[in-house]
Image: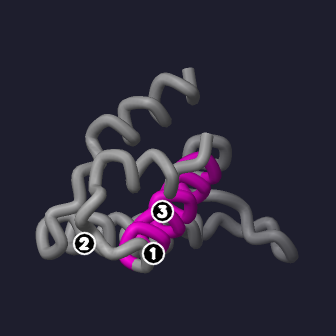
Amino acid sequence: MNIELELIKDNPRVQKVLLKVFSDAVKMYREALVNIKENGAICKHPRTGSPIENPYLKISEKYGAILVKMSNTNKIKSDRVLDMLEKADK
């Protein structure tokens, strides 16, 4: 699914560059969530094997905050697209 094109359908008056940034943030957020789901919030350090906080937690927090801010500031409608992504994950 092309997230950016779907967002354009729901947000015809929003600048395309904003929707591109939003789309990229959605992709990064989802990638981080997949990693956290697969490896847990605490995972093994790749070299030492010691338990560490999963670095993707910070990525999910960062991009989650960007998505919330952009949704509120730029009035980006994303519910339909996010629902589609959630259904595709199942």
Residue 41 at x, y percent in the picture: 51, 55
Secondary structure category for the residue under label 1:
helix
- Mark 3 vs mark 2: which is more N-terminal? 3
Residue 31 at x, y percent in the picture: 60, 55
- Report the residue marked by disc 1: 21
Image point (48%, 62%), residue name: 23
- Mark 1 vs mark 2: which is more N-terminal? 1
Q: Nearer the viewer, residue 66 or 11?
A: 11
| C-alpha separation, residue under disc 1 versus residue under disc 3 | 5 Å
Q: Are marks 1 and 2 in contact (CB under 8 Å)?
A: yes
Residue found at the very far front of the displayed protein: 12
- Report the residue marked by disc 2: 70
- Report the residue marked by disc 3: 23
Secondary structure category for the residue under label 2:
helix
Secondary structure category for the residue under label 3:
helix
Q: Are marks 1 and 3 in contact (CB under 8 Å)?
A: yes
Mark 2: amino acid: Met
Q: Main structural element of the magenta stretch: helix, strand or loop?
A: helix
Q: Is there any visible trace of residue 41 in the rendered image?
A: no
| C-alpha separation, residue under disc 1 versus residue under disc 2 | 9 Å
Mark 1: amino acid: Val
Q: Quadrant of the C terminus?
A: top right
State left or right for residue 90 relative to residue 22.
right
Q: Nearer the viewer, residue 70 or 56?
A: 70
Q: Quadrant of the N terminus?
A: top right
Task: Tell me, yes or no, whether the highlighted magenta stretch contains residue 74.
Answer: no
| C-alpha separation, residue under disc 3 versus residue under disc 2 | 11 Å
Q: Which residues are magenta?
A: 18-35
Residue found at the very far right of the displayed protein: 47
